[in-house]
Amino acid sequence: MTLEYPVGKATSSQLQALTKALWSWSLCTNCQTETPCKTPNCSWSRSTTLSRFFEFFKIPTSGYKCNIVPGQSPGLSSYNDLFRILEQLKSSPELSKSELLEKLFTDRPTRLYQERALNLAVQVVVMINCSASRQSSVLLEYGNEEARLHLNDTFSQFLNDVFPKTSHPSIDEIKSELLATKLKKNARLEFLPTDDLRNHLRLDKNSGVVEIFHHTAFLKEQLRLAKEQPQSLSVFDLIQIGALPRALVIEVLDSIQKVIFDLTDVKSKELLLSLTLTSTCNSDPGILRFESVTIRKPEEQNIQYYYFGARLADLHQELMNPTPRGFQKWFERKSSPRFVMMATVAGVMFALSLGLSSLALGGFQAYVGYMAWKYPVQAPSGS
């Protein structure tokens, strides 16, 4: 058995092929030959804004490894294999996972390698860390359950399940209170970038960390793809053009740029800027750029939060009733009814022992006095 990294590190031409597979980019001849671009409408001119996304893409693909035995083939042997899976996901959202695997892997690599290859493709298409069929019990115990694409699920069903919609009419009333500066000062929360769209605005109460999905250039490409499409397009139809639901994408962007890190608030914008520094979090710098005309429809300026409203409500609850951490957590734990009762019992026992000691001392003094009275010491007679 040999350990292989069959895909290797992505080159510029492979990144160009990625943009074609994901978003149907049209590249000029100069860009394809890596010479200076002279075409005004060449899609590759936007590639500089996707640098963080490309960095993200290179990590799981170059690290894709297989333990190969003679006669076996890996799930992926090249980037072309991955792009073929991406295009199949987009063109066949009605197929279940088992049907996709059957159609994609005619050379029959092991099921584990088939699933890993498909999960990697899902991660690249929709930025969701998709797990294998079975997960570590440790991850489940600590609440880190990853999204699971079951064998009978279609890709469109998977997206609907991962991002359920709920109504939160009170969000409009609390949005102004959810500035990052207030959350940091009053609830002692910290913010960290995440590459998993599913974890956006996820609050870990134990650590006081809020995850922020930072690949805004990726999100803006989704909006460009579907800007001219009818508003009524289903998830099924959106997948076929390579786009996520517009309402979902806009919620992520607005929850960052209009709510948590309101770009019109100087201090909040400074805090957001700190997340883009390479010395700290290295978030996508595009997170600081608000775009409207090029990617939004006129009716998409003010939105309702159906996808992430619950998490905004969780942050507001944390702001109103901060979870004790550090010394405050220790003090509260020691102040709980159980410890108060223990302290009371200890105090009673101490008082009882002190009382018994005083009683014993008083008895001894009485005994000494009695003996002195009964056996008085005679004064010596004078000579």
Image (cartoon, grey):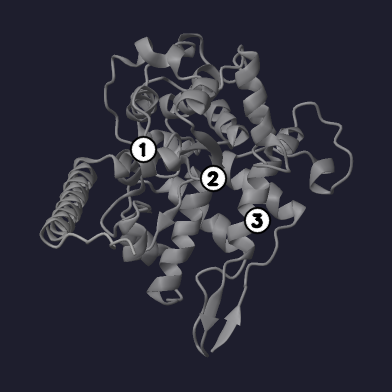
Structural crowding at the residue carrying mark 2, measured as other residues with C-alpha within 10 Å and reported as few (<14), some (14–19) or many (≥20):
many
Which amino acid is tagged 2? Answer: Asp
Q: Mark 2 against mark 3, which lies toward the viewer?
A: 2
Looking at the image, which is closer to me, 355 or 67? 355
Separation of marks 1 and 3 at Cα, in angstroms: 28 Å
Left or right position of 306 against 8: left
Quarter of the figure with the C terminus: bottom left
Secondary structure of the residue carrying numbered label 3: helix
Residue 55 place in picture, x, y as percent: 67, 50
Residue 178 place in picture, x, y as percent: 45, 19
Q: Mark 2 against mark 1, which lies toward the viewer?
A: 2
What number of labels is visible? Answer: 3
Q: Quadrant of residue 206?
A: top left
Which residue is farthest right?
36
Secondary structure of the residue carrying numbered label 1: helix
Image point (59%, 37%), residue name: 215
Q: Quadrant of residue 275?
A: top right
Q: Label 3 belongs to which residue? A: 58
Separation of marks 2 and 3 at Cα, in angstroms: 13 Å
Q: Label 1 belongs to which residue? A: 236
Looking at the image, which is closer to me, 51 or 122? 51
Secondary structure of the residue carrying numbered label 2: loop
Structural crowding at the residue carrying mark 3, measured as other residues with C-alpha within 10 Å and reported as few (<14), some (14–19) or many (≥20):
some
Residue 197 place in picture, x, y as percent: 47, 40
Which amino acid is tagged 3? Answer: Lys
Label ID, residue 356: none
Image point (13%, 58%), residue name: 367
Label ID, residue 195: 2
